[in-house]
């Protein structure tokens, strides 16, 4: 029989970390014992796997994956899939990032270190932010929360959120003082699945 990891899942690994299976819809990782992980690597839809030659532990794992909907089977090879079944990240595992996208704010609170006259912090350009988002994706980051300053003062904020979405990075939170919230902003945040 031929087995293939469904499009919803991807095998992942990090330096000095266990290997696992990433659910692309929830961004959660199910860590797998190495023996199970190596068997999953052969579930590429092209290799004929003889279940009778698997040990009982592997057979049980295969049944669990079929039941979970993580693996599908066929009597013939599957067509080539669009994405690789395994992605290795050459760094330690980082689940999420808390990113200050701006040092600017629509308020001038005395207690805030961002409102000093000699504040040397300069905001990244849109291009620099998009490059950073690309690097986040390369590192396997699956979730980002945005803060500032006040992130809603960035004219390109939703371009950055769209870039995250395009890279399968969920923007989980936008930390805001709330003064710039409008019905339109709330609808956009809802559209992208972010909470403010």
Image (cartoon, rainbow, N blue to C red):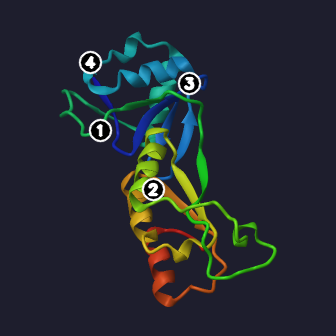
Please give the label number shown on residue 73: none
Q: Quadrant of residue 95?
A: top right
Label 1 residue SS = loop
Task: Report how far apart the C-alphas of labels 1 and 3 lie in the structure.
Answer: 21 Å
Where is residue 121 drawn, in percent x and y? Answer: 62, 60
Q: Determine whether, in the image, residue 109 is placed left or right of residue 140.
A: right
Whether residue 127 sits left or right of residue 83 in the image: it is right
Marks 4 and 1 sit apart, C-alpha to C-alpha, by 20 Å
Q: Nearer the viewer, mark 1 or mark 3?
A: 3
Give me the C-alpha separation between circle 3 and circle 4: 30 Å
Residue drawn 67% across and 82% down?
107
Which label belongs to residue 15? 3
Tag 1 or tag 4, which sits nearer the N-term? 4
Say which mark, if any, is on residue 129: 2
Cα separation between marks 2 and 4 = 45 Å
User: Label 4 near label 3: C-beta < 8 Å?
Assistant: no
Q: Earlier in the sequence, mark 3 or mark 4?
A: 3
Q: Residue furthest top?
A: 53
User: Which dot, 4 or 1, sits closer to the camera?
Assistant: 1
Q: Which residue is mark 1?
A: 83
Disc 1: CA contacts within 10 A as few (<14), some (14-19) or many (>=20) = few
* N-term mark: 2 or 3: 3
How many residues crowd mark 4 within 10 Å: few (<14), some (14–19), many (20+)? some
Question: What is the crowding at mark 3: few (fewer than 14 residues within 10 Å), some, or many (at least 20)?
Answer: few
């Amino acid at each position: 029989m031929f087995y293939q990891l469904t499009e919803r899942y991807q095998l992942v690994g990090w330096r000095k970390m266990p290997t696992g299976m990433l659910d692309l819809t929830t961004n959660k990782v199910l860590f797998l014992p190495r023996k199970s992980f190596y068997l999953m690597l052969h579930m590429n839809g092209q290799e004929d796997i003889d279940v009778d030659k698997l040990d009982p532990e592997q057979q049980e794992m295969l049944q669990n994956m079929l039941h979970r909907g993580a693996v599908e089977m066929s009597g013939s090879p599957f067509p080539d899939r669009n994405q690789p079944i395994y992605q290795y990240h050459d760094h330690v595992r980082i689940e999420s990032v808390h990113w200050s996208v701006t040092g600017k704010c629509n308020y001038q609170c005395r207690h805030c270190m961002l409102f000093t006259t000699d504040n040397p912090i300069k905001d990244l350009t849109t291009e620099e932010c998009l490059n950073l988002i690309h690097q986040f994706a390369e590192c396997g980051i699956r979730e980002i929360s945005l803060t500032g300053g006040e992130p809603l003062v960035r004219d390109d904020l939703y371009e950055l959120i769209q870039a995250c979405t395009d890279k399968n990075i969920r923007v989980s939170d936008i930390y805001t003082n709330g003064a710039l919230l409008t019905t339109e902003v709330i609808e956009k945040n809802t559209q992208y699945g972010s909470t403010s």
